[in-house]
Amino acid sequence: MRLGTIISIGASVVLALGALLIARLWMGNHPAHTAQAQAAAPIPDAPVVVAAIPIPWGAKLDYHYLKVIRIPRADMPQGAYASVGQVLNQEGGPPVALQAMAAQEPVLATKLTGPGERQTLAALVDPSMRAYTISVTAATAGGGHILPGDRVDILYSRELPQPPAKGDNWAPKIVGTTVLIQSVRVLGVDLNANPTSTQPAVPSTATLEVSMQDAEKLALAVQSGGTLSMALRRPGSAAIEPATHFMLDDPRRYARPAAYAADRAMRHASHSGIPHVERSAQVTVVSGETSSSVSVPNETARF
């Protein structure tokens, strides 16, 4: 081989190595170009079913509600569907939306009824909870402004039993109120279970999502007489306040303070030998092989 050819090949190798070194140094000083090169690399994606148009609560799904898009596989939400047929061709027919969905929102199994399941209130209840219905009025249900999806506190009020009046004395009237349950979700008001409804109405019943123990408390409160009322919470408020009991004494104490004070002193003297009685009592509820205890007002408490 000629000497000139060898020199030419060697020079070409040196120039190529130099160009590669210069390119590496240049790219190291320009990270944007490096990021563009990495972005150009293909990202694994997967199909996912989303809402083609807004889906209202309670709608029975069909093809015009759904479409398929592709998203990065790493962003695939749990419970998503890969095809429209997978959503609609279920045993029992197409499902029903348990909540409203916006356009482009992924359609998930938790947002739909199960195979063959009707769109009923039972489908909205958490697996560990129960639906319990109480009687309400406009005054005890926020003037009709409490709607499905709101969270409320349940208050229990009733007149406490008092000893009968003797002679010219009169028995004071005492009303007690306690916060029975806090931060419970309203599932339905009358026959309305749509959590997207905004129209107030005068209700006669309210269905609440409560634990089994809280359902027992409500049942005992209803059977004991008195009134159950709902206090509406601000959206997002989940604070649980310490349990409190409030008692309202007879208003005649302010109109006749001297007579009231004398009557209270006489009653206190007549009951001085009676041991202290707690204002609440524990009641054990037995169901099959299980039992639970709940606190209820003590009927024997007087003052």
Image: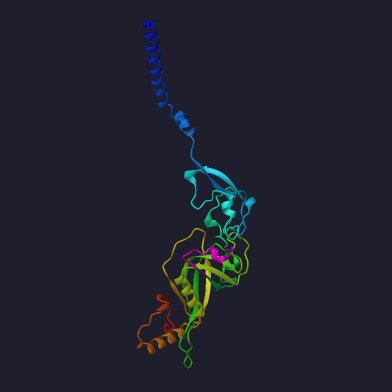
In which quadrant will I find the N terminus? top left
- Residue 229 x %, y %: 53, 72
Q: Residue at x 49, y 76 (%)?
A: 219
Residue at far front of view = 1
In which quadrant will I find the C terminus? bottom left
Q: For residue 292, which quarter of the picture?
A: bottom left
Magenta segment boundaries in residue numbering: 117-131
Is residue 254 visible from the viewing direction of this image? no
- Residue 261 x %, y %: 43, 84
- Camera-side residue: 249 or 100? 100
Residue at far bottom of view = 167
In the rendered image, the vertical position of residue 201 relative to residue 77, given as above or below: below
- Camera-side residue: 74 or 190? 74
In the rendered image, the vertical position of residue 144 relative to residue 41, given as above or below: below
Count of numbered badges drawn on the protein: 0
- Camera-side residue: 249 or 57? 57
- Camera-side residue: 156 or 24? 24
Q: Residue at x 57, y 44 (%)?
A: 69
Q: For residue 118, which quarter of the picture?
A: bottom right
Would you say the magenta stretch is mainly helix, strand or loop?
loop
In the rendered image, the vertical position of residue 227 relative to residue 119, given as above or below: below
Q: Is residue 121 magenta?
A: yes
